[in-house]
Image (tube, helix red, strand yellow):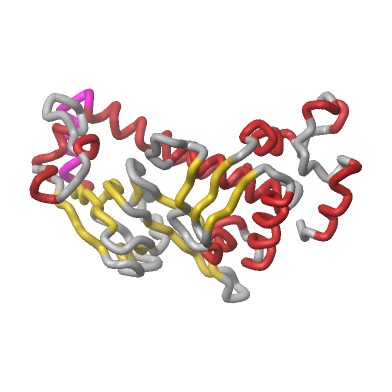
């Protein structure tokens, strides 16, 4: 059982026994991970599916030139471990010290899903949410400028992290990880954050604390890669490269 008193979990992390997720409790085990601890090996297959209870996990691939690419950032409430038949599993490792995972034997869950329609629908929704998460990352990577990518990342983290104050973020990963997630250099990430701060769109406190000052301007960056004629001039984001007052943004690499 995923007991909050036993594992020190917040109450919302403990599934209702009558819910589809509660039906999986009988086969779940909780794993506490150290920062950097490997959860699944590169090129291997997984016999378990995982749900993050607290902390964060990254899945990585190594490019032909030796550089690392974070292909998925997994936060509380997210699942991972799904692969195609005979498909390889990207290595996964804990980012945060004390990351807690619920581990579910894949074959046991599949058996439960065959006998319980609610569990079957839950697992289908989980897979759809995983695909949606990866699509959002692809959209981030497709942004025109570095500032747009970093701005989209901040909005995505704000939406995914459980927080009573969504405009106040404590980033779960370092700037090096952000760089590997957005496929850019750490120097570009730092310059983009500084640029957004200088524009008055965010405020920074230390290396990981971010306050979103102007969410509307940050959100409008998502339309910055649309044809200019499709977006009214007054709705263009303040960091859009076509804006006259932000011509200096050309100093920030795309």
Location of residue 36 in the rendering, given as x and y in whole percent from the top left corner = 35, 69
Can you name the residue that lies furthest to the right here? 244
Residue nearest the observer in this picture, 128 or 101: 101
Residue extending farthest bottom: 66
Q: Would residue 64 appear left or right of 93 to someone viewing this image?
A: right
Q: Which residues are magenta?
A: 108-118
Question: Quarter holding the C terminus?
Answer: bottom right
187 w.r.t. 128: above or below: below
Whether residue 152 appears in magenta in the rendering, the answer is no
Q: Quadrant of the N terminus?
A: top left
> Which one is in front, 183 or 200?
200
Q: Nearer the viewer, residue 202 or 148?
A: 202
The relative height of residue 73 versus residue 187 in the rendered view (above or below) is above
Image point (10%, 43%), residue name: 3
Residue 197, x across and y down, in percent: 67, 50
Q: Viewed as shown, does residue 156 lie left or right of 25?
A: right
Question: Where residue 49 sits: x, y (%)?
Answer: 27, 49
Q: In terms of secondary structure, what is the magenta stretch mainly? A: helix
Name the residue: 55% across, 45% down. 211
């Amino acid at each position: 059982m995923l007991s909050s008193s036993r594992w020190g979990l917040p109450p919302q992390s403990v599934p209702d026994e009558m819910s589809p997720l509660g039906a999986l409790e009988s086969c779940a085990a909780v794993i506490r991970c150290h920062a950097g601890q490997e959860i699944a090996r590169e090129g291997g297959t997984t016999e378990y599916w995982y749900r993050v209870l607290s902390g964060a996990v990254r899945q990585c691939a190594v490019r032909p030139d030796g550089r690392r690419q974070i292909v998925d950032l997994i936060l509380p409430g997210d699942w991972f471990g799904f692969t195609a038949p005979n498909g390889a599993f990207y290595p996964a490792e804990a980012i945060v010290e004390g990351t807690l995972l619920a581990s579910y034997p894949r074959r046991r869950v599949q058996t439960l899903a065959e006998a319980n329609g609610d569990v079957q629908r839950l697992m289908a929704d989980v897979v759809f949410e995983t695909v949606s998460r990866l699509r959002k990352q692809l959209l981030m990577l497709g942004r025109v400028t570095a500032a747009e990518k970093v701005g989209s990342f901040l909005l995505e983290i704000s939406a995914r992290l459980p927080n009573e104050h969504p405009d106040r973020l404590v980033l779960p990963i370092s700037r090096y990880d952000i760089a590997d997630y957005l496929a850019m250099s750490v120097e570009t990430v730092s310059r983009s954050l500084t640029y957004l701060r200088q524009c008055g769109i965010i405020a920074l406190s230390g290396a990981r604390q971010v306050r979103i000052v102007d969410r509307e301007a940050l959100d409008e960056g998502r339309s910055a890669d649309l044809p200019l004629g499709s977006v009214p001039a007054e709705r263009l984001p303040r960091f859009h490269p076509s804006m006259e007052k932000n011509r200096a943004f050309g100093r920030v690499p795309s």
